[in-house]
Image (tube, grey):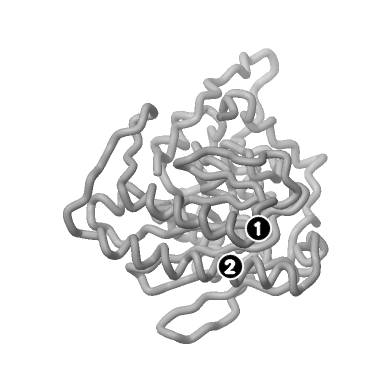
Amino acid sequence: MTDDRRRAPRPFDPATFDDSAWGAAWSAGLRRGTESELRSWLDLAMGCADEADAIALAHFRRDLRIDTKPDRTYVTQADRSIEALVRDRVRAAHPDHGMVGEEYGTDAAAASVRWYVDPIDGTHNYVRGVPLFATLLAVERDGELQTAVLSAPALGDRWFAWRGGGAWVRRASATSRVSSSAVASLGDAQVVYSSPAGVRSCGWAPGFDDLVARAWRERGFGDFWGYALVAEGAAEAMVEVGIHPWDLAAPIVLVEEAGGRVTDFGGRRGVDVASVVATNGRLHAEVLEALAGPPAPPGADGARDTTPGSRGA
């Protein structure tokens, strides 16, 4: 696994930040394949999600075997079963595709097309009987994410997106397109986050408390749920640290196709970042600047702890 210290965000610099790299048309320009290719990957991911939902619900709020991994996060038989299922389905359909998964690591890392699998995002919720958990699937071609599925069976909701095809939610058997909000002022914005303690302790966001104080409303709606809220326009910003590629791959496609923006605290875009800000796009620079806090006084020691808190699972 990549050392998180090497992924510490550079300081945010509003003078050099490109505030135009977002929006649905911009996202469509990131397509790396034909419509039929992307839709075929999406169809496979949707089929995998159907089976994953059944596995997750079969164990939810029932007898559950829970193990602790070396990083002290939890893993269940549902996590392992779902990821194994997805790997089997993808290998059968596309033996040349690579895989990046939370439970079983990376296969065929140099493959042109790779799948990202988080079998149960929100495992801690899952083991405690909280219905905010989801299977996250995303497909990447030549380093650019192309399709995504976020399936939350206990909620009965499934979000999906593909480059140039928009962002969508299927809810109560009805499917509708979603888009990020048009809110243009932080004072009118809802800011959500996964772990305020993690954000405060990471040393990368000295202005976090100021950010939430300036927002119209703030709530701890974390994991996949925070990104879904931004994509649907129910929130304007999601803030998180301790993220992993399998946590972030699917939300990136969803938020960007919904018209929003996703970067680390320094404004860098990528699936391998350790801090994340997802916004409706309009507020991105303002949120990043608020997180950075006021400039350090001349001669001040700018050294900070660069070890992020882990969101776990």
The circle drawn on residue 94 is 1
Q: Tell whether 214 sits left or right of 23.
A: left
- Which quadrant is the C terminus positioned in? top left
1 vs 2, front mark: 1
**Label of residue 176 in the image:** none
Q: Residues within 10 Å of mark 2 (few under 14, many from 20)?
A: some
- Reply above or below: 72 against 40: above
> At numbered mark 1, what does the secondary structure look like: helix, strand or loop?
loop
The residue at 25%/60% (across/down) is: 60
Mark 1 touches mark 2? (CB < 8 Å):
yes
Can the viewer see residue 238? yes
Quick one: 303 or 102, which is closer to the camera? 102
Q: Does label 1 or label 2 sit earlier along the sequence?
A: 2
Q: Amino acid at mark 1?
A: His
Nearer-the-camera pick, 149 or 188: 149
* Residue at 72%, 66% in the rendered image: 163
Q: Which residue is mark 2?
A: 44
* 82 relative position to 33: left or right: left
Indicate the quadrant where residue 261 lies.
bottom right
Mark 1 burial class by Cα count in 10 Å: few <14, some 14-19, many 20+: few
Question: Would residue 61 appear left or right of 166 to someone viewing this image?
Answer: left
- Decide: is 306 above or below 239: above
